Amino acid sequence: MTIVAQQRQELSDKEKKQAICKLMLQILEILFDQNNAKLALHLGLSRSVIGKWIRAGECGYNVSQKERDNDYQKFLVLASIHRSLYSIFTNPKDRAIWFYASNSDFHGASPSDLVKSGILGAVTVKQYLDYQRGLGV
């Protein structure tokens, strides 16, 4: 019996962007309660940019490559935060409560506040959640 290994094909840049946009829409629905304004605020973008992305079905629509790369980087960190929250909290409302509530581990700031402050704040929240998941919380 011969086992045939299936070759894994790399996604094109356009397919990657579409997958990221699809994930963004899922996170928008779950973490930001379908609120474009909240997502825009956390990504540091305008609501109109988020609206264009959704209508075009492609994130980064109508912006420069550098802006797109920065947006993707922050969005991927947000996706990681969402994944961690999903694994820690079974109830979506609990995820949102934790995300928007002040946290003594962040000196009274909420994870949302840190994410809004920029990429370093978002990475701080991501690393905190990765650590908590590692502890089995």
Image: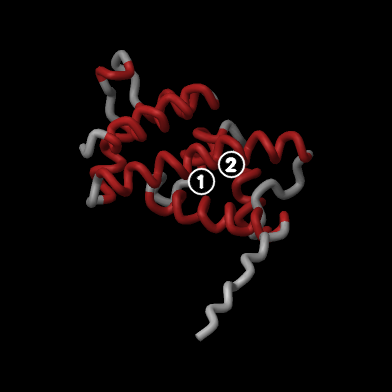
Label 1 element class: helix
Marks counted in the figure total 2
Residue density around tag 2, few if under 14, some if 14–19, many if 20 or more, within 10 Å: some
- Give left or right: position of 133 versus 44: left
Pick the front one: 125 or 64: 125
- Give left or right: position of 83 versus 104: right
Residue 47: mark in rendering: 2
Give amino acid for label 1.
Asn
Q: Earlier in the sequence, mark 2 or mark 1?
A: 1
Where is residue 109, by image quadrant?
top left
Residue underneath mark 1: 36
**What residue is drawn where x is 56% and y is 35%?**
74
Q: Residue at the front extreme?
A: 1
Q: Position of residue 8 (x, y in %)?
A: 62, 65
- Give left or right: position of 36 versus 136: right
**Contact flag, marks 2 and 1 (Cβ < 8 Å):** yes
Give amino acid for label 2.
Arg
> In the picture shown, does residue 135 fall above or below 95?
above
**What residue is drawn where x is 69% and y is 46%?**
60
Q: Position of residue 14 (x, y in %)?
A: 72, 58
Residue density around tag 1, few if under 14, some if 14–19, many if 20 or more, within 10 Å: many
Q: Position of residue 123 (x, y in %)?
A: 47, 28
